[in-house]
Image (spheres, coloured by chain):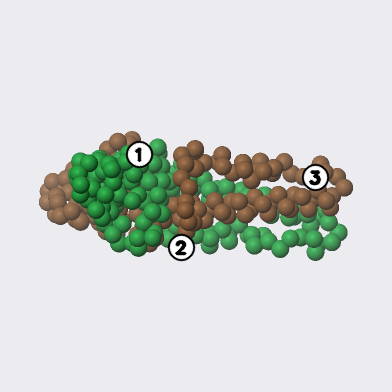
Chain colours: A brown, B green
Amino acid sequence: MASSTHHCAPCAACKFLRRKCIQGCVFSPYFPPEDPTKFANVHKIFGASNVSKLLNEIAPHQREDAVNSLAYEAEARLKDPVYGCVGAISVLQRQVLRLQKELDATNADLIRFSSNQSILRPSQSSGSSVQNAHVLPHYYGSYSWNNNP
Amino acid sequence: MASSTHHCAPCAACKFLRRKCIQGCVFSPYFPPEDPTKFANVHKIFGASNVSKLLNEIAPHQREDAVNSLAYEAEARLKDPVYGCVGAISVLQRQVLRLQKELDATNADLIRFSSNQSILRPSQSSGSSVQNAHVLPHYYGSYSWNNNP
């Protein structure tokens, strides 16, 4: 417990990197000593230097979210080295397509069984499943896979 | 074009790293010289050393998918430094919940307007939206966000 530290214990990052945790440490607010795995995962996948650079490039009020999303990605990559959290995107995209098809079919049933078509609820998603491609920023759709996870 | 190289040109990784692209280069099959951005992105976010370690730890037939998922994550992180591709997961999860609710409501309409409930299509997703939590491996649900992107 050096007098220059701002916590009773160094943050998980400084402890992992065996360095002094100084006032203003960019990792300290987001990597508490009680959760050493969070930093270890992020360090293994992204590297401490890359994470430090990233944090310094974004606004302080967004850093916690950034660290949590990095930790999420790192954990996913460690559990699934091939697809990482892109595997989750693939699963969710398939689920969206399945639900959209099911909803379209159910709406078609509703048209058949209802004498009054005005009962149909106005649907953002009725029509064509192709609309799903537009819910994500364009760059999320820029990669195609040879094999789905 | 050194005689020891296995391509007419060094791969994008070796070109970026200004090193000789030797036979057996772990990057070469996945980072063609025509697409320098793919490696530059992956290098900036993960670091060449981490990517090299990761590729060496997985089976050769899965390396292309791994590189593509890393490139996808890297591109997403560069476009959205705070949420990266976890932003896409969040968007898709909300879309799944919305579709599930819409499907439940449409099925309820169908029950109301049909005299014969046997017309309802058997639905994997009917019932409760809570089921959605189970479509992803457990670790995908282990992080919660202070703010959604």
Quick check: can you spot residue A86? yes
Residue A39 screen position, x and y as percent? 28, 54
Could you say which disc has been placed on residue B96 in the image?
none
Q: Which residue does the numbered mark 3 point to in the structure image? A: A119
Marks 3 and 1 in Cβ contact (< 8 Å): no
Residue B85 screen position, x and y as percent? 43, 46
Disc 2, SS: helix
Disc 1, SS: loop
As drawn, is B76 to the left or to the right of A16? right
Per the model, the C-alpha gap separating discs 3 and 1 is 55 Å
As drawn, is A115 to the left or to the right of B29? right
The three-letter code of the residue at mark 3 reads Ile
Please determine if labels 3 and 2 lie on a single subunit.
no
Q: Residue at x 75, y 49 (%)?
A: A107
Q: Which residue does the numbered mark 1 point to in the structure image? A: B34
Can you tell which of label 2 and label 1 is closer to the viewer? 1
Per the model, the C-alpha gap separating discs 2 and 1 is 39 Å
Residue B91 screen position, x and y as percent? 51, 45
Per the model, the C-alpha gap separating discs 3 and 2 is 39 Å
The three-letter code of the residue at mark 1 reads Glu
Figure check: B62 above or below B6 = below
Can you tell which of label 3 and label 1 is closer to the viewer? 1
From the viewer's side, name the closer residue of B49 and A88: B49
Mark 2 or mark 1: name the one nearer the start of the chain.
1
Q: Which residue does the numbered mark 2 point to in the structure image? A: B138
Quick check: can you spot residue A28? no
The three-letter code of the residue at mark 2 reads His
Using the rendered view, name the quadrant where residue B39 is placed: top left
From the viewer's side, name the closer residue of B133 and B71: B71
Q: Residue at x 28, y 59 (%)?
A: B56
Using the rendered view, name the quadrant where residue B33 is placed: top left
Disc 3, SS: helix
